[in-house]
Amino acid sequence: MMNGRGRNDRCFQKHQQISLDILGKTVGSNEHFWPQERYKTEARGKEPFMLTVLTSHYVNQLKGNMAPDEFIKKYRRFKVKENMQAQVDRLTEIYDKWHTTEPVNAKKLIRYILAYKYETERHSKLVKINIEDFLTKLNSTPKGAQELKDADTQVKKLLNL
């Protein structure tokens, strides 16, 4: 025979599992843009943050080992191209805030944005990342132009471009 507490514990566990099942699909994570097998081969010696994109756990599960362009075509409802551009746009906004207050992180962000563009376009024929405004802004000052040049050199070397 079960006491009242036992039923409450089972009920709580059931509700907790339902909550995790629902929320788990929406939790954001940093995921690989192209299939895992290729990532493991190509990622050797590279900074891991340069090889990933932000997405939800649910979308990443659907993608599995599917090539990026195949996923984009199959799941148009996720607006992958638009969301990837929006992510870069947001990162450039963050750079605008950081370039005077967080100069070390701002330099890392330049590298990340460049790598994001290069890697995305290397692995996708469908996605073209537009960073023209960002590049124009960086090139508008001698310091920004030098930081861009340094970052571009580092990223291209790192990615073997």
Image (spheres, rainbow, N blue to C red):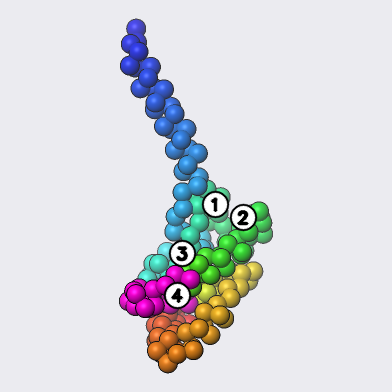
Q: Which mark is residue 52?
A: 3
Q: Sequence-wise, which precedes: disc 4 or disc 2? A: 2
Mark 4 neighbour class, 10 Å CA radius: few under 14, some 14 to 19, many 20 or more: some
Instruction: Give the Cα distance between marks 3 and 2.
Output: 17 Å
| Span of residues in magenta | 93-114
Residue 27 visible: yes
SS for tag 3? strand
- Which residue is identified by label 2? 78
Residues 60 and 39: in front is 60
Rendered location of residue 6, percent (x, y): 34, 17
Q: Residue at x 51, y 60 (%)?
A: 35
Q: Residue at x 46, y 49 (%)?
A: 27
SS for tag 4? helix
SS for tag 2? helix
**Are dots 2 and 1 in contact, CB under 8 Å?**
yes
Instruction: Give the Cα distance between marks 2 and 1.
Output: 8 Å
Q: Which mark is residue 155?
A: none
Rendered location of residue 14, percent (x, y): 43, 27
Mark 2 neighbour class, 10 Å CA radius: few under 14, some 14 to 19, many 20 or more: few
Mark 1 neighbour class, 10 Å CA radius: few under 14, some 14 to 19, many 20 or more: some
- Compared with 27, 139 (above or below) is below
Q: Is residue 142 magenta?
A: no
Magenta span: predominant SS is: helix
Q: Sequence-wise, which precedes: disc 2 or disc 1? A: 1
